[in-house]
Image (tube, rainbow, N blue to C red):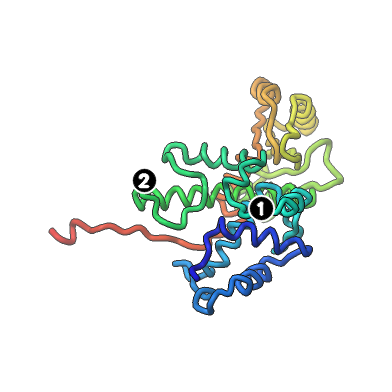
Amino acid sequence: MPVPDYQSLMLPVLTISTSGEVRVGDAVNRLADELKLTPDERAQLLPSGKQTLFGNRVHWAKTYLNKAGLIEGTRRGHFKITARGQQVIASHPVRIDNEFLIQFAEFRQFKERSAESTATAAAPAEPVFVNNQAETPDEVMRIAHKQIELTLASDLLDRVRAAPPAFFERLIVNLLLSMGYGGPAVDAGRALGRSGDDGVDGVIDQDALGLDRVYIQEKRYAEGNNIGAGAIRDFFGSLDRHKATKGLFVTTSTFSPSARETAEFLSKRIVLVDGEQLTRLMLRHNVGCRVEEVLHIKKVDEDFFE
């Protein structure tokens, strides 16, 4: 049989998680056995040669089930079914696919974010594994790339929210250093940790000598737990105690309109970075992620034939 598409694998992936915590690699092998894939089908690789086609599609099925709240990550490379997932299994669905998952608010929000990101291309917000006749191959590739990055950004934000507070503090300092702040000094940035420093979580030098510094406030909040104007004013007071002229406020949630307005009109420069912008910066500067594959797009060299 041909390797099933990722939507056809959603129900098998959810079903296999009913027995308890599952390692992703074990799920791939068990599902390959259950579907009686041949050795050639199991070994079929993506064009990159770095991952099997079947393993990649199991991964996408798992990702979408996670976005719908049917499964959840437990530790690195492992997942388990949620109470919602148990309810779905108890309803004995014939098939689980994107149309089925759209009933869940979290999945609709995920799809809406995808649609917003690809609106200019008028493309479906889902992984593309075959040519879409409505778009050129060049457009399909870029749409797929946008979807992969969107899913990765969402995964990064989930990981950051689940990490310990100390990890989040180190992450922000490392990100700023990767962005070029601090110059060549090794100790140009540091997290201050739970000891705190009058309402400041981190500090980074803007130059190699530390003549100018940026103070950092970080709030690792869940989605919907937005930062209000009071937190901005408190941070402003902390900057004042440090005789600082600028600060960076980072959160994994977002800022209320009043918080943004307050930051805009205060006498000290306070830059606000919410969860969406944070993941964009992490992707751009390869913090918490890495390049897995590079695709080269080639065209005819007209000069060569003249």
Where disc 1 sits, the SS reads loop
Q: Is residue 146 left or right of residue 268?
A: left
Give the x, y percent position of residue 164: 79, 51
Residue lying at 68% horizontally and 38% vertically, measured from the top left: 214
- Specify whether residue 170 is in view: no
Name the image quarter holding residue 232.
top right
Give the x, y percent position of residue 140: 41, 50
Amino acid beneath label 1: Pro
In the image, residue 260 sits, relative to residue 121, either above or below, namely: above
10 Å crowding of disc 2: few (<14), some (14-19), many (20+): few
Where disc 2 sits, the SS reads loop
Q: Are marks 2 and 1 in contact (CB under 8 Å)?
A: no
Residue lying at 73% horizontally and 47% vertically, measured from the top left: 161
Q: Nearer the viewer, residue 42 or 296?
A: 42
- Specify whether residue 173 is in view: yes
Residue lying at 57% horizontally and 42% vertically, measured from the top left: 111
Extreme residue toward the right, this view: 195
Extreme residue toward the bottom, this view: 39
Q: CA distance from mark 2 to mark 1?
A: 31 Å
Give the x, y percent position of residue 182: 63, 47
Extreme residue toward the left, this view: 306
Mark 1 or mark 2, which is nearer the start of the sequence?
1
Residue lying at 55% horizontally and 58% vertically, measured from the top left: 6
Q: Which mark is residue 174?
A: none
Give the x, y percent position of residue 134: 36, 45
According to the picture, the residue beneath numbered tag 2 turns out to be: 134
According to the picture, the residue beneath numbered tag 1 turns out to be: 93
Name the image quarter holding residue 245.
top right
10 Å crowding of disc 1: few (<14), some (14-19), many (20+): few
